[in-house]
Image (spheres, rainbow, N blue to C red):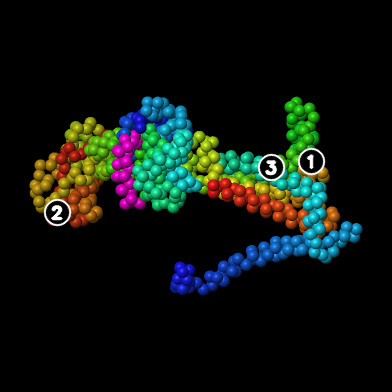
Amino acid sequence: MARLDIENLVKRYGDFHAVRDVSLSIADGEFLVLLGPSGCGKTTTLRMVAGFIEPTAGRVLLGGQNVTLLPPWKRNAGMVFQSYALFPHLTVAQNVAFGLEMRKIPRADIDKRVEEVLALVRLGGYGGRLPRQLSGGQQQRVALARALAIRPDVLLLDEPLSNLDAKLRQEVRVEIRELQRQLGLTTVMVTHDQEEALTMADRLVVMNEGLVHQVGSQRDLYERPADRFVAGFVGRSTFLEGKIDTPGRFTTQGGLVLKCVGGTTGPAVLSLRPERVEIAPVSQEGGPLAGLDNQLQGTVEFVSYLGSLIDIHVRLSPADRLVVQIANREGGFAPDVGQSVHAGWPASAGQVFKA
Amino acid sequence: MSDIAVATGPVVEKRRGEGLTATALLAPATIFVAICLLAPLAFLFRYSLNDFVATKKMMVEAVTIANYVKFFTDPYYTTILATTVRIAVMVTAACLLLGFPLAYVMARTQSRFKNVLIILTVLPLFVGNAVRSAGWMVVFGNKGFFNASLQGLGLIEKPIEIMYTEKAVIIGIIAVNLPFMVLTLQSVIEGIDRAVEEAAFSLGASPATMFRRVLWPLAMPGILAGTILCFILAMNAYATPFLLGGPLFKMMAPLVYNQFTQQANWPFGGAIAFILMTVTLGLTLVANLIFQRRRAS
């Protein structure tokens, strides 16, 4: 295992910028997740690290060594593909042994190593099967075993769970994460699934349109999103359009005057997490809203019952609508459509971004 | 006794008319093949066992293997068979060698001109063999385009003899067969996940190793199909060897034709036709077996 440094990586296809100036440092043993919508450049970045795509500019350093111009077969990077890309004509054991044979390791050592790695992914005894005789989850584990067998300097995962069904995906997430910790693997994973990203990563990178928008921990991204894109992409946010009159004072397009923290005068957008907003019946003065910086009256327009949670869409003004999420507690307040309610939040719950 | 259990299980009732429709749809092709292929073959085989009176140019009813014996005991004819097999093998090997890279590029290209590439590959098939061979004659002649160009450039002094040699025949048949090889290979390579190649690279395989260990074995069904198709076409080539090889160059298909039309020797012509068919089939099967055995091991 080794550290991985990506320096000012750029990939252009004609006029199209797939990746614009991406720099990242992944520490030895760290699990980094590249998160973003499709076409954001995350896969291109990963493929440049693997060596399948030659960067237009920038450098890739693996364990301090510049590998930017090395072909993939001369880098020691283990890759797990979205389609698994198992060799269909080879058995499970032959698939796992492939990389070891390329390294001219003696046969006896290869057999021993293959057995170890298959046991590691709980596929001991499956060595003689062909990939098509395995379930999707098992194939995924073979792909992982094949990448691990070569003791790679870095493990690259390209949407490795997207072909598994939802329940299996949750199990495999934990499994890969535990294996990664146990072996101390420097890992880069690409995904568009934020739940997957949040459960697995040490650190996350949010990308969009070829740019890195924010790098940070789960908490950083959620509590302190760097910009409107991150606020909307990681978790959910309600965006109120408007402007900052003076720092600390935000006026929405609908004319609501709200207290916020900081901001610079000019057009802006106020972002609110749905679960940070309190809601109470109009009749009940004070109550849960007592002392909140912002207290507004609105009408419930839409309610969606999600089981443990309830989403409530509240119309605050003709131009402003807010989503509030409340826990579904016994005896808790659950408004109906058309009902008038009070919604409130502390100034610190809102994030102000320049529009 | 699981078979019995299945047999005695509830029989799914067929929708009425389903069997009838299937019969109606299959019958025309079956009848066509029976009448237009099997019947002539049966007659031809019967003729090949007949006697031939050379002086009267007449076929005489008999049951004899004399025609087959004649073919295999006369070095003139066995040489023609050997030439045919040799040419067919060389052409097939050349088509595979030339066709694989082209098929690979066509299968993997992301270009929007991919369809144009495919049409260009098929285009030669729009021109009949005879017409094409006539074209080759113009190009390959001693004063043809090829020699005139080289002489004009001062690269050669005397024209290179191509026309009416084996070279011309081989080039000609390759040109005819290449599209078949390319199209067969291309469709199979397209079915191979590109990520599988990348996986091999990421595991440390150089392009040559990746080709040998991954691409070649996975493309094997296409290689086999393309090779068989190409070999059969080459073994039975008629117009190309006839027009480009000249009067002294002999291959099997022109020989068969010659026996029927020039010599009016139907029994011997029939025998040669059957020998050609059997050798083609036999060699194809043997190659198939060898390939498959090597794959299994």
Q: Secondary structure at mark 3?
A: helix
Look at 72% across and 51% down and name the residue there: B236
Which range of residues does the magenta coloring cover? Answer: A165-187
Whole-percent x and y of residue A222?
A: 25, 39
Q: Marks 3 and 2: which is nearer the front?
A: 3
Q: Chain of mark 1?
A: B
Look at 52% across and 37% down and name the residue there: B209
Label 2: which residue?
A332
For the residue pair A341 and B67, the one nearer the viewer reads as: B67
Q: Which mark is residue B164?
A: 1
Magenta span: chief secondary structure = helix
Does the magenta portion include A167?
Answer: yes
Same chain letter for marks 3 and 2? no
Q: Chain of mark 2?
A: A
Kind of residue at disc 1: Tyr
For the residue pair A341 and A62, the one nearer the viewer reads as: A62
Look at 20% across and 46% down and name the residue there: A275
Whole-percent x and y of residue A330?
A: 15, 55
Q: Secondary structure at mark 1?
A: loop
* Residue B142 at least partly seen: yes
Does the magenta portion include A103?
Answer: no
Kind of residue at disc 2: Gly
Left or right of A269: which side holds B247?
Answer: right
Q: Chain of mark 3?
A: B
Q: Earlier in the sequence, mark 1 or mark 3?
A: 3
Whole-percent x and y of residue A315?
A: 22, 49
Look at 18% across and 53% down and name the residue there: A328
Q: Marks 2 and 1: which is nearer the front?
A: 1
